[in-house]
Image (cartoon, rainbow, N blue to C red):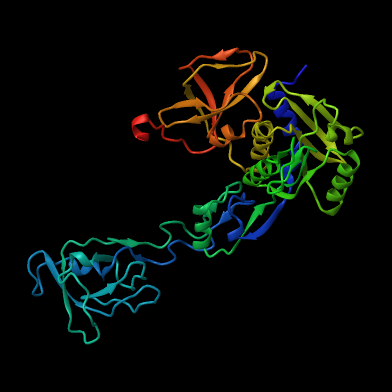
Amino acid sequence: MPATVAEHQRRVLELLRPLATLGAETVPLAEAVHRVLAEDLPAPISLPSFDNSQMDGYAVRSSDFADAGHGGGSVGTVRLQVGAAIPAGVAPAPLGPGYAAPIMTGAMLPQGADAVVPIEQASPDTFFPDYEDGSRVVALPAGTPPDQFVRRTGSDIAAGATALRAGTVLQAPQLGLLAALGMAKVKVRKRPTILLLATGDEVVQPGEPLPPGRIYDANTTLLRTSLEDAGVLVRNCRLLADEVGPFLDQLRRDLHEGHVDLIVTAGGISKGAYEVVRQALADQPVEFTSVAMQPGGPQAIGLVDSVPFLGFPGNPVSGLVSFEMFLRPALAALTGYPPPRPELTARLTETAASPRGKYQVRRGVYSDDGSVRLVGGAGSHLVHALAEANALVHIPDGTAGIEAGEKVRIWLLDRPQQRMTEEGNS
């Protein structure tokens, strides 16, 4: 009796549980995108690391504004002597009472200053061309409070506070934070190393002549890019013929040449006469089984020379659906990356039939109006429909179909697409 999808998902998770303990490595920030942080990370410095100006303007002492209207200024303004300008990147001299220092955005606030008046509020509202003779005077609005337009030390994060937690997936914002904290490297969890083998005498490498009865190989490209997108290292990716001896020889060479955490194959696991993977691994603790799922019914799971092994069907859509349903979720659960596919409920735009005893996974286009349109049929060879889809549509076992307008569960593969009307296309 075929296993259910949930049963096979649990088996894959248990098989791959060692991936949760692969250890850690330190890599440059440029190589850390999509990697998972291995440990809590305290901030080595404060951000900002010094009080600085939020605006181009004048650094002032708010105490100079306590008696607005005195000293020759008109009511509502304060006249202050202009001090030396403060560009970004310098340590300024202290600011004395009665002075205003031209300061640029991000520049260090001088000792004694506790506020900034934007240049737009000054009279004149442009900076003087020189400041050295001490004769320049600027009128600034009264009522300037302490801390106005000042970025205080540690207002973003204080030194010693936790910047990022272990398990954080490092994307551009997180890597930007680490760079701002002065960190050139980061400790991340090691990625699983995967050996990918596709099989088939009928398969030809893209770019080569296509003889009659042959097809181009889509599996190595489809599965390799999917695996790499899921954050693993694909150490080798090969297309092999349906010959048991050469298949085993190449497999053993690949295992001997370097560490492998998981072997994945595409094709050769069904009950046909030329199922090379099934024949080659007959003496290994590998189970060639069936899952009540369409597409992707044939599956293989076990160990090959003590290395975890998963065998996917050879039809390209079946292989990708198998990856999405079984391997990708296990990687997310055990290694922290990739993130789970966003799951939504959507309104089906048409009736969909389904084998009652099978969990059907259809391809669809989800639109931002909350509807999902099926593309292609249920067949496992429809690569063009797969390329058009941005969602996997789940039709659970035990149902003979779903009517148009009913809700279905979907996994988003890409961002929603705006549904276009005929008028919009014209």
Question: Quadrant of the rendered structure where residue 292 is?
Answer: top right
Q: Is residue 64 left or right of residue 336?
A: left
Residue at 34 percent across and 79 percent down: it is 93
Query: Which residue occupies the foreground of this view, 43 or 302?
Result: 302
Residue 171, horizontal then vertical, whole percent: 54, 51
The quarter of the rendered structure image containing the C terminus is top left
Residue 270, horizontal then vertical, whole percent: 80, 27
- Residue ranking furthest to the bottom: 133
Residue at 88 percent across and 36 percent down: it is 280
Residue 78, horizontal then vertical, whole percent: 14, 69
Exactly how many numbered labels are in the figure? 0
Residue 9, horizontal then vertical, whole percent: 70, 29
Vertical order, 409 against 87 (above or below): above
Query: Which residue occupies the foreground of this view, 102 or 322?
Result: 322
Query: Which residue occupies the foreground of this view, 380 or 394?
Result: 380
Question: Quadrant of the rendered structure where residue 319 is?
Answer: top right
Q: Is residue 154 left or right of residue 10?
A: left
Vertical order, 72 against 183 (above or below): below
Q: Is residue 69 left or right of residue 356?
A: left
The quarter of the rendered structure image containing the N terminus is top right
Question: Quadrant of the rendered structure where residue 328 is?
Answer: top right
